[in-house]
Amino acid sequence: MIAALAAGCSTGTPTTQTPALGVTTESASPSDTGTTSIPPSPSPSPSASPSPSASPSPRPSPTATPAAASCPTTYALPDPKRPRLSATVSFSDGTVTGTERIVFTPDLAVSEIVLRLWAAAPRPARAGGGIDIRSTKIDGRVVTPRRSSPTVLRIPARVAAGRAVTIDVAFTLRLPTGINDRFGHRGTTAWFGSGLPLLAWERGRGWAVDPATAAFAEASTSEAMELTSLTVRRARGLNVIATGVQVSEDGVTARFRARSVRDVAVAVGKMRVAHVPVGNVDVVVGVAPGLADSPLATARELARAMRVHAARFGPFPYERLAVAVLPDIGGGIEYPGAVLLGKNQIRDATASHEVAHEWFYGLIGDDQGRDPWLDESFATYAEALDRGTGPTYERMTIPSAGKGQTGRPMTFWETRQSIYFRSVYIQGGVALIQARRAAGAAAFDNALRCHIRRNAHRVTTPADLRTSLAKLPAAIRVLTAAGALR
């Protein structure tokens, strides 16, 4: 995620150029030409103390990170017991009505199911956004949940470790207008990210109930899920840009699916659409009415960044990258296989930054409330290597209150929002650049590729990164000094 103001610091031109792509049209379909491919991609989860609502396990966590000495040759596969999500949403002006079903197999015994309601977070709520829960069921039985805070829904349910439970929720979203956020609508254009009630589980740990943030930032956590079906209904004549591969479309109802994603984003509107193939990945861009952005130029820049990042970190982890260029948003907001983008964001490093998040947050996840640097610093690092902006970032001054504090949680930055960007994005990104320099670029790049492969489809922690860098003490020293490895 990067705000427009923050993106203003990300200036410069790419130092890595990609040859012009082949024949591309407004309706071109993906081809098998190119360099990026979809890997076999599941894995263990971190070991830590369980949350109060999860019973501790007497055994070591089955998801402990393997020793850094072993480097997988491909991405770890998604957990076969990952949650399975199916959802249906219907857009009507500024309202979305929806239902979802989650089949969840906890690895710890639980006494409740916790869903996060991010539409009720401070930023959308201030502009009139929100979410109403119409009904909840556990294994087909109606139950009464409680909201312990605006974004935390607690549903009573005693579930033993290893037993599958089915959760059904019916909800209504109210989309605000005129706010720079993941929820919004303007005219016939409407969008949401993190709009579905989100299962807030971290394997080996328990429920993630980090407080919501009022900043242009995230505090969410979710395991990678199989999106078995996402059905989007809207008025005829409106396009749909959404997470996953589109499997059907009749002009009113579109359906999508995805093998392994942590969250979902959807946008509808009378958009101008372009496709660019990158190997067997389809980059699709929809530009909302009234915006001058070229969908084709935007798709080409995203494709260029995708090729650069894939060459450095490994194959692009999704079958499709769906991007909606929207009014009111300044900067970009990342989702696995999807991005909500503001206007004119290919003029700076924002597009590259958001594509980098498909590896850092999408493929290897993190608790964004607890460890925001694990995705934001890494995305900044990736776009700095891509765009050649590292020297500019190294010259930037870090506020004294943020020096050495890169690894702090969002609760720390909540009262320090004005210094969050420089203290986490810039300080953390620079620390990674300097760690690479200290350890040697080849050794650092190899260790990071092994880290990504080993931890694919997991929720990672700074301890996992430290393990992956164990043979590079010079890099660890640099990251520790920045407060990233606390």
Image (cartoon, rainbow, N blue to C red):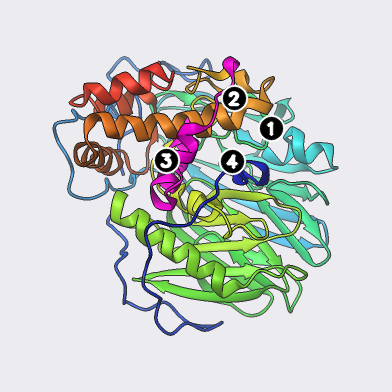
Callout 2: 10 Å neighbours few (<14), some, many (20+)? many
445 vs 108: above or below = below
Callouts 2 and 1 close, C-beta under 8 Å = yes
Label 1: which secondary element: loop
Q: Secondary structure at mark 2?
A: helix
Q: Nearer the viewer, mark 3 or mark 1?
A: 3
Magenta residues? 372-401
Label 1, on which residue? 215
Give the residue drawn at x 25%, y 41%.
445
Say if residue 312 shows up in the picture. yes
Which residue is at the front of the view, 180 or 230? 180
85 lies above or below 370 = below
Q: Which residue matches tag 3?
A: 381
Q: Is residue 236 rendered to the left or right of residue 78?
A: right
Q: Where does residue 308 sit, x and y in percent of width and height?
A: 36, 57
In three-dimensional space, the C-alpha distance between marks 3 and 2, rounded to whole angstroms, equals 20 Å
Q: Amino acid at mark 4?
A: Leu
**Mark 3 touching mark 2, by CB under 8 A?**
no
* Left or right: 305 in relation to 447: right
Task: From the top left corner, tell me how far across and down residue 209 is, in percent.
Answer: 59, 25
Task: Give how far apart the Cα atoms at labels 4 and 1 are.
Answer: 20 Å
